[in-house]
Each structure stands twice: as structure tokens, then as C-alpha cells.
């Protein structure tokens, strides 16, 4: 980036952090920054001098301290003119109010500095027809798309087959996107850096080649390929689309047949809890054997299934089947930017470890979204004392699946 642009970028980042630090929410917009740049820079300098040394507004503002006054004034004027050109663009409406981390602040500043007036509404003028993201991760392999239907955007999500088991996870999912939501997505699309490249090794290591593709109404296409690790700018767009999908249609996550794989992933991600899983395995074996002549799967005693199993996977199929019989009324909903995963438990007298195993497998795929999770468990009052013995295990589960915010227990 040219030196002048670097200075403009640093000042822009400083000004965004500045108004976030001193302005009420209703004034967190580009119009306020223009007013400050036009007439209040002396006040800004005095205020920023009072900021803590680690405050980001001060850090970025101080990067301009070596400029001569004439050069500094030119940076202020150039930045003001650029903001004036882009401040009325719908893409930037409420842009400052939705910022949540340093990367987003820097991304917004970059969009302002690199803004082209002729193409200020490039996303709208060129009319995006489709935005497609193919996730390259071999476990969470899925296909997400935004499609234009006249002037309305629609979302489409299709989770493909798992490349290891070849089982389809979820079928087609369609969802509507409001104009306000579309504007936020357009802003994230503008931030995509199509010039950055990755090494060929990244396409293979850990998964297949993923990609982002944007097709415009005029026939032009922008494409960026990546491997199992999705770039940050595309990840931000991907997560925003997934969130809209989840809010619109609720959650239809991995089927029960994936519980074994899900628990395996949690075990792999938490090697420090190896002893917990080893002890759980022993308890599960004891519980299954203890219930072999009491519990039934599809009309047959567990003992009949145990007599025919040939490997550990077949054994854990029994564990999952008992989980299905003991965990019911499962539902996932979205509330106050949190995922509420609710379920009812039964057979606590027979299957403590079996239930914990299945709870891990149920909650893990939901945790991939990265949102806080409330696990709401309803239990018959008669199991209250027995359930207390599961509390320690649930605390460990909460440590392993870190975005579980709470296990909320309801007795009926």
C-alpha cells in the first residue's frame, strides 16, 4: 500500500476507535467522523492524549506523529473526502455499530480507503446473481449459496456427504434474507481479498479444496480457492450466512448416526481428558452389560445384539441406540444470539455414562457455529438424586465444549 494510503488508513482506524470511545450509540456513523475531521481535529488531539497508552485510537493516531503539519493536514483532508464519497452508500449504514473486533475495524477502514466512487455501489450495480461458498473441511463439508430472485436474495444451504462415512448429513435448506441482512452481507463481500494466494499444499492438507465464487449479472465471476482452513475474510461471510440460515429455519443438525464421530472429534480435540474418556468407556460397558437382559432395541434384548457384535463400532451403535431411547423431545432454537439445545432424559437409573456420551455427540455439532450454547435438560423429579451424580461429568463436558455457557436443569 502507498505511504499516503497507509497514513489515511491509520487515521481512519484511529477515528473509528475514537468515536466508539466517546460518542453515544446514535452518533456512531461516518457522518460524525466527517464533522470531526472538518472542524474538531484540535479537540481530537487533546482528547486522545488523555487516552490510555494501550487504547487503539491512541496507538493508530500516534503512528502519524512524525508527519509535518502540512502532510498531516493533507491526510485529514484526503480521508474526509473519501468518507464523504462513501458515507451515503447503503453498505456503510450502521457499519460502525456492528463492529465487534479489531479485524472488522481494520476491514471497514480498508473499504473506506479503497472505495471507488464510480463503483461505489458495485455490489448493487453489477447485481450479484450468486455467492457460493464450498467449505473444504472434510468433516463439515457443505455448500452455501446466496441467490438473487428478482430483487430479493434467498439463501440455500446443502450439507453434502461426509467424505469418510459417505453419509448425507442434511438435505436442502432454503431461507429468506431481508434487505437489512443483505446489506451486511454486501459489506462483508466487499472485504474479500481476491488477490491473496495460498500455497498448493493448503488445498490438500486436512481436506479438499474449498472455494468462494461470486457471479454477477453481467457474466463476470470472482473466485478464490482455499484448503481446509478457510481464510478469515471468507470465514466471516460464511458464518454470517450460516447464522441467517439458523435463525430462519431453526437447526437440523447431524443425525444420531454421527454421534460416534462427534464424540471422537471431542476426544481428539481434548487430549488432556483422555482418562475421562477411558473411564467413561469402562462405565458404558458396565452399564450396557448390566442392562443386557432389561433394555430392548427394536423389540430385542441388548443381550441378543451383544452376541452378534464384531467390533467396537457395532458396540457403540448399541450405545447410540440406547441414547435415542433415553433422550427425547430434542430441539434446537435460536434465542438472544444464543443456541438453546433442549432435551428430556429418561432411564437415568440404568445409563449415566451412556447418556453423557450421547449428550456430547448431540451438542458438539451445534458448537461448530461458535455461538454460546444453553443446554436445557428436563428430568423427571424422581431422578433428581441420581442426576446429581452426573453433575461432575457435565462440568467436564462444559470444559471440553467451551462455548457451552450453561447446563440448565428443569425438573418436572
Image (cartoon, grey):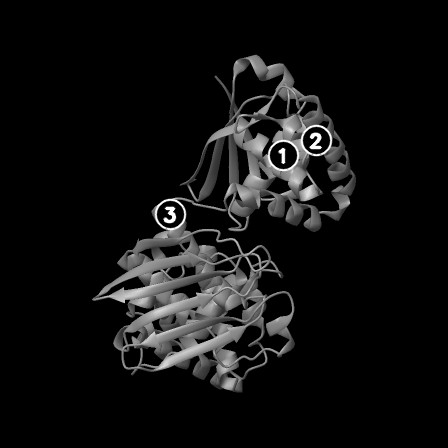
Identify the element where label 3 is drawn. helix
* 189 on left or right of 137: left
- Label 3, residues with CA under 10 Å away: few <14, some 14-19, many ≥20: some
Q: CA distance from mark 1 to mark 3?
A: 32 Å
- Residue 333: mark in rendering: none
Q: Secondary structure at mark 1?
A: helix
At 33% across and 67% down in the image, what residue appears? 91
Name the residue: 56% across, 80% down: 197
Looking at the image, residue 406 lies above or below residue 242: above
Q: Is residue 186 above or below residue 157?
A: below
> Where in the figure is residue 10, as x and y percent of width and height?
52, 74
Determine which residue is flagged by label 3.
247
Asked if residue 45 can be seen in this view, the reply is: no
Q: Nearer the viewer, mark 1 or mark 3?
A: 1
Which is nearer the eye, 402 or 300? 300
Q: Which residue is mark 2?
A: 284
Query: Is residue 237 visible to us here?
Result: yes
Q: Which mark is residue 319?
A: 1
Amino acid at each position: 500500500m502507498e505511504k499516503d494510503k497507509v497514513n489515511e488508513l491509520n487515521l481512519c482506524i484511529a477515528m473509528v476507535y475514537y468515536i466508539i470511545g466517546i460518542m453515544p450509540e446514535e452518533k456512531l456513523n461516518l457522518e460524525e467522523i466527517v464533522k470531526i475531521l472538518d472542524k474538531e481535529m484540535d479537540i481530537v488531539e487533546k482528547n486522545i492524549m488523555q487516552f490510555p497508552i494501550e487504547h487503539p485510537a491512541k496507538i493508530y493516531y500516534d503512528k502519524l506523529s512524525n508527519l509535518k503539519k502540512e502532510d498531516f493536514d493533507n491526510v485529514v483532508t484526503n480521508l474526509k473526502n473519501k468518507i464523504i464519497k462513501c458515507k451515503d452508500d447503503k453498505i456503510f449504514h450502521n457499519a460502525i455499530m456492528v463492529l465487534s473486533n479489531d479485524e472488522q475495524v481494520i476491514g471497514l477502514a480498508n473499504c473506506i480507503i479503497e472505495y471507488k466512487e464510480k463503483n461505489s455501489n458495485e455490489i448493487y450495480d453489477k447485481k450479484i446473481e450468486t455467492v457460493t461458498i464450498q467449505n473444504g473441511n472434510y468433516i463439515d463439508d457443505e455448500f452455501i449459496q446466496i441467490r438473487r430472485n428478482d430483487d430479493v436474495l434467498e439463501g440455500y444451504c446443502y450439507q453434502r456427504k461426509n467424505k469418510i462415512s459417505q453419509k448425507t448429513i442434511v438435505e436442502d435448506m432454503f431461507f429468506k434474507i431481508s434487505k437489512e441482512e443483505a446489506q451486511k452481507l454486501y459489506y462483508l463481500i466487499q472485504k474479500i481479498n481476491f488477490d491473496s494466494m495460498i500455497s498448493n499444499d493448503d488445498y490438500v492438507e486436512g481436506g479438499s479444496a474449498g472455494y468462494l465464487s461470486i457471479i454477477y449479472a453481467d457474466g463476470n465471476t470472482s473466485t478464490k480457492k482455499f484448503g481446509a482452513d478457510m481464510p478469515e475474510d471468507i470465514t466471516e461471510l460464511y458464518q454470517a450466512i450460516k447464522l441467517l440460515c439458523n435463525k430462519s429455519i431453526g437447526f437440523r443438525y447431524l443425525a444420531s448416526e454421527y454421534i460416534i464421530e462427534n464424540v471422537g472429534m471431542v476426544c481428539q480435540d481434548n487430549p488432556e481428558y483422555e482418562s475421562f474418556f477411558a473411564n467413561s468407556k469402562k462405565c458404558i460397558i458396565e452399564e450396557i452389560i448390566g442392562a443386557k437382559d432389561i433394555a430392548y432395541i427394536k423389540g430385542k434384548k441388548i443381550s441378543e445384539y451383544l452376541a452378534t457384535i464384531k467390533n467396537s463400532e457395532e458396540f457403540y451403535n448399541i450405545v447410540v441406540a440406547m441414547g435415542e431411547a433415553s433422550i427425547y423431545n430434542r430441539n434446537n432454537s435460536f434465542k438472544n444470539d444464543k443456541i438453546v439445545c433442549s432435551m428430556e432424559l429418561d432411564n437415568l437409573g440404568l445409563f449415566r455414562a451412556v447418556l453423557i456420551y450421547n449428550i456430547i455427540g448431540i451438542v458438539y455439532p451445534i458448537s461448530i457455529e461458535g455461538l454460546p450454547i444453553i443446554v436445557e435438560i428436563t428430568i423427571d423429579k424422581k431422578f433428581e438424586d441420581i442426576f446429581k451424580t452426573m453433575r461432575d461429568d457435565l462440568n467436564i463436558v462444559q470444559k471440553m465444549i467451551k462455548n457451552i455457557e450453561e447446563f440448565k436443569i428443569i425438573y418436572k
